[in-house]
Amino acid sequence: MTHIQFVIAAYGIALLCLISLVVITWAKHRRLLRQLKLVHSLVDYES
Amino acid sequence: MNLYSLAQPKKLEHSLTIIMPLAYGISFILFAAGLYLALISSPADYQQGDSVRIMYIHVPASWFALFIYGFMGLSSAAFLVFRIPIAAYMAQAAAPVGAVYAFISLATGSIWGKPMWGTWWVWDARLTSMLVLFFMYLGYMFLLESSDDKEKALRISSFLAVIGLVNLPIVKFSVDWWYTLHQPASVFKMEGPSIHGSMLKPLFCMASAYLSLFIALVCNRLKGILLSHKIRGLQAKLTWQGES
């Protein structure tokens, strides 16, 4: 492997990890917001 | 507004709603600028050639893997001593970010080591203590999920986080205390940085990017933790309404 290939591999892995972390965090947050909306509507329906 | 008012979930949530998008925006700009400076604008090293560019992604990840563990340990100590639940939630929010940064440090360091040292890995003091730090992060996160009793799990994992603080000076000073393959400090030392300004600029730009991304992600995850508590409270109310 040439030096450039090592650089590309390193940056590729790092950016993949960071982007995955951001995407997973956002997705979890959106899932919780949907869950909150559902539970709110259930509480309103019950009362 | 004083610092203690941030321990109230409603006030904290309001602050997080303001800080989070700002931090994400700033981190995006800083990463774009940092990547340009690191990959295009900065010079190659006279010995390492273009491999030196791995420094700009490896070194800030290492710095913040240590910083985030320190943040986690101090937050956990605040939770155990002062019984502030928000402090434990902040540690909980920071852990995965720190674990990813530690993984990036290990992976990019390994990739840098192959062309420079001729090996992907050596069991020298710096690399081994950094690997231990990564395992401490994983241990903290697994302990949090280990029990159905969330309060108990939070207390046990907080103890682990505080005990793990002993590893931070070991990681930092390992290159001074032992004869290691990993080079000694080049930036944060008594005599001042020994690397050229043309390389310091992209390094600090990427470090700022890592920091702002950490702030954005912790705010995001903390909001998620507060949301899940709200949901649990409403579910308990639903159960109570159903029973009555």
Image (tube, grey):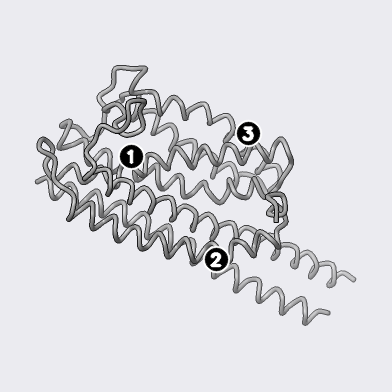
Q: Amino acid at mark 2?
A: His
Under tag 2, what secondary structure? helix
Q: Amino acid at mark 1?
A: Leu
> Label 3: few (<14), some or many (≥20) within 10 Å?
some
- Chain of the residue on which disc 2 is drawn: A
At 38% across and 54% down in the image, what residue appears?
A: B209
Distance (Cα) linking label 3 and label 1: 25 Å
Q: Is residue B180 left or right of residue B99?
A: left
Labels 1 and 2 share a subunit: no
Labels 1 & 2 near each other (Cβ < 8 A): no
Q: Quadrant of residue B78?
A: top right
Labels 3 & 2 near each other (Cβ < 8 A): no
Under tag 3, what secondary structure? helix
- Chain of the residue on which disc 1 is drawn: B
Labels 3 & 1 near each other (Cβ < 8 A): no
The image shows residue B115 at horizontal and vertical percentages of: 15, 37
Name the disc covering residue A29, or none: 2
At 70% across and 64% down in the image, what residue appears?
A: B230
